[in-house]
Structure formats: C-alpha cells, structure tokens
Image (cartoon, helix red, strand yellow):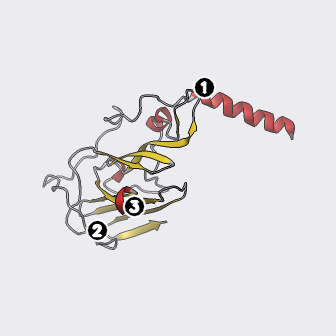
C-alpha cells in the first residue's frame, strides 16, 4: 500500500514539471491552431442580442458576438477569466492557495488546454452539432451583481447556453449548460 502511495506521489510530482502552468496570465488571442467556426452561407452574423428566459426555440433570432471578449468574475476565493469564444474558463485562480512561486494557484493548465480543451467546453460523445459552439463567439452577460456570468449563442439552428453563479466566499458554484440543434436533443446539465 505504501509503495502505491509513493508511486502516485511520484507521478503527481513529475506531472508538475511536464505540464507547468503559464505565468503570463490569460492570452487575449486563442491558440493559432484553433480555427474559427465558419458561418453558414448567406447572411453575416447578426449583431449581439440577448434572449430572455431559458426555454427559447433554436429557430429564434440569431444571438452571437462579433469578436472575442474576456469577462472576469472575482470572489473572495476565486479570480476567473472567461472567454466568450465557446464560453470557457481561460484562467481560474484560487486566491487562498499559492503555487511554488508564491502566486495564486492557477487551475487552468494553458499548455494542456491548447492540446485538449479549456474548462467548460462542450464535449461530444457522438455527433457534433452543425455549428460547434466551442468556436462560436457567445454573448456574455454578467449576472448576480458580478457573481455570475451567462453565455448564449444561437444561429437559428444550433443553440447553446451556459450559466455560472458563484457565492461571494464559497468554493461551491452552480453551473447550467444546454445545447440543442433544430430544437431537438436539448440536454440540460446542472
């Protein structure tokens, strides 16, 4: 049993050296290897609009931003930087914990995220939707007096919604995520 614990500890220590988090903070640009989703032929993306409510049909008016924007949520325990490109967390720091350099502990490993996905990205077991919302510029709205953020995207066919709500001094938070295509296959994860 002690040998197993020693081996697990060794693996954890080695992984710190293989995947060191970036100390530069979140980038303003996404990685160069990631391609922007192609807009459907025809009309250009509509200006940013927000839909009210959470049960809106996928065939409603388009909801999309025109470029990447970063949104920050600060609590007593977290400092989080979200990108509206896919509604992902680009940086997630724990204020009460420090890394080996004395800086707040960064939970997002940027090098690993460039190879896989950033936290809160949509992952698919089967078929991807026609428009992958991980590459879409979602409309970001700060909610709950700065303690929440909501991301929404719709192009008339694919609709994605993510909503996060944080407590002012708690590590617990609420997440709601929905994805539907042609108003079918709607999955709500809470």
How far is the residue under mark 1 from the one under mark 2? 45 Å
Of circles 1 and 2, which is in front? 1
Tally the marks: 3
Q: In the image shown, does 18 or 158 lie closer to the viewer?
A: 18
At x 49% / y 66%, what residue is drawn?
Answer: 190
The vertical placement of 72 against 9, above or below, is: below
Q: Are marks 1 and 2 in contact (CB under 8 Å)?
A: no
Secondary element at tag 3 = strand
Image location of residue 145, percent across then percent down:
35, 60
Q: Mark 3 = which residue?
A: 163
Mark identifier at residue 58: 2
User: Which of marks 2 and 3 precedes in the sequence?
Assistant: 2
Say which residue appears at 63% left-offset and 31% top-offset.
Answer: 15
**Helix, strand or loop status at disc 1:** helix
Tag 1: Cα neighbours inside 10 Å, few (<14), some, or many (≥20)?
Answer: few
Mark nearer the N terminus (3 vs 1): 1
The kind of secondary structure element at disc 2 is: loop
Q: Position of residue 95 (x, y in %)?
A: 52, 42
Residue 187 shown left or right of residue 8 in the figure: left
State which quadrant residue 5 falls in.
top right
Q: Is residue 155 left or right of residue 44?
A: right
Q: Position of residue 152 (x, y in %)?
A: 31, 59
Quarter of the image where the N terminus is located: top right
| Residue at 29 percent of width and 53 percent of height | 138
Q: How crowded is mark 3: few (under 14 residues within 10 Å), some or many (20 or more)?
A: many
Give the residue displayed 30% in from the left and 50% down from the top: 136
Q: Is residue 62 left or right of residue 172?
A: left
Examine the rendered structure and indicate whether residue 60 appears above or below residue 28.
below
The residue pinned by badge 1 equals 17
Q: Marks 3/1: CA distance?
A: 34 Å
């Amino acid at each position: 049993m002690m040998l197993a614990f020693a081996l697990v500890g060794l693996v954890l220590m080695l992984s710190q050296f293989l995947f060191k988090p970036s100390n530069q903070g979140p980038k303003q640009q996404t990685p160069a290897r990631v391609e922007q989703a192609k807009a459907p032929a025809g009309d250009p993306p509509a200006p940013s609009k927000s839909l009210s409510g959470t049960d809106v049909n996928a065939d409603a008016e388009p909801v999309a931003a025109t470029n990447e924007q970063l949104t920050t949520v600060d609590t007593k325990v977290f400092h989080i930087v979200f990108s509206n490109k896919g509604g992902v967390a680009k940086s997630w720091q724990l204020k009460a914990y420090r890394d080996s350099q004395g800086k707040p502990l960064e939970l997002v490993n940027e090098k690993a995220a460039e190879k896989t996905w950033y936290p809160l990205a949509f992952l698919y077991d089967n078929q991807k939707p026609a428009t992958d919302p991980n590459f879409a510029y979602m409309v970001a709205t700060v909610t709950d007096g700065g303690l929440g953020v909501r991301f929404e995207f719709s192009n008339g066919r694919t609709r994605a919604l993510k909503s996060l709500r944080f407590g002012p001094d708690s590590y617990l938070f609420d997440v709601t995520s929905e994805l539907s295509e042609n108003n079918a296959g709607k999955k709500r994860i809470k």
